[in-house]
Image (cartoon, grey):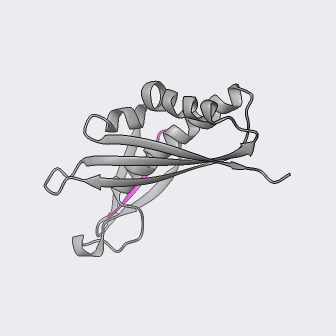
Amino acid sequence: MKARVKWVEGMSFLGESGSGHTFLMDGAPEAGGRNLGVRPMEAMLIGAGGCTAFDVVLILKRSRADVTDCVVELTSERAETDPKVFTKIHFHFIVTGRNLKPELVNRAINLSAEKYCSASIMLAKTAELTHDFEIREVAA
């Protein structure tokens, strides 16, 4: 896997993935940024959410669950001193579908957290990770 980050101006940087996608990162105004994009640490947190959501949806689909939506809401805490690593991250999954079984959703989340999600497993080296979920039934 490769990536490239290019300084644009001020404290803005353009992230370019090896697969050809880009996104803008910028600093907070108090750090010289203009608030034009996500902060790099926000991108890390979003990446962990995307990684685990991908796993959960894939596991549920492979289990033939009728899943129609998956949202992961993340809250985090960071160390107060440099390096300001994540110290706590909570993943709240909102999984929507038809007749979803709580045991199956829980199993998918645990498999992602313990075996498949490289991003969250890596972040678990410095942060306490917690998870919970809710299931929403699709209206017929």
Vertical placement of 36 versus 128: above or below?
below
115 or 119: which is nearer to us?
A: 115
On the rendered structure, is 75 left or right of 112? Answer: left
Vertical placement of 51 versus 38: above or below?
above
What is the quadrant of residue 10 in the picture? bottom left
46 or 97: which is nearer to us?
A: 97
47 or 26: which is nearer to us?
A: 47
On the rendered structure, is 107 left or right of 39? Answer: right
On the rendered structure, is 69 left or right of 82? Answer: right
Which stretch did the figure color magenta?
12-19
Vertical placement of 137 versus 66: above or below?
below
What is the quadrant of residue 2 in the picture? top left
Whether the magenta-drawn stretch holds residue 11 is answered as no
Residue drawn at (47%, 56%), measured in percent from left and top?
23
Residue drawn at (36%, 50%), measured in percent from left and top?
5
51 or 98: which is nearer to us?
A: 98
Residue drawn at (37%, 72%), measured in percent from left and top?
35
Query: Could you tell me residue 42's position as x and y percent?
Result: 38, 56
Q: Main secondary structure of the magenta part?
A: strand
> Outermost residue, right direction?
140
Query: Could you tell me residue 40's position as x and y percent?
Result: 34, 55
Query: Could you tell me residue 130's position as x and y percent?
Result: 39, 42
Looking at the figure, which quarter contains the N terminus?
Answer: top left
- How many marks overall? 0
On the rendered structure, is 53 left or right of 128? Answer: right
> Outermost residue, left direction?
81
Query: Could you tell me residue 138's position as x and y percent?
Result: 77, 50
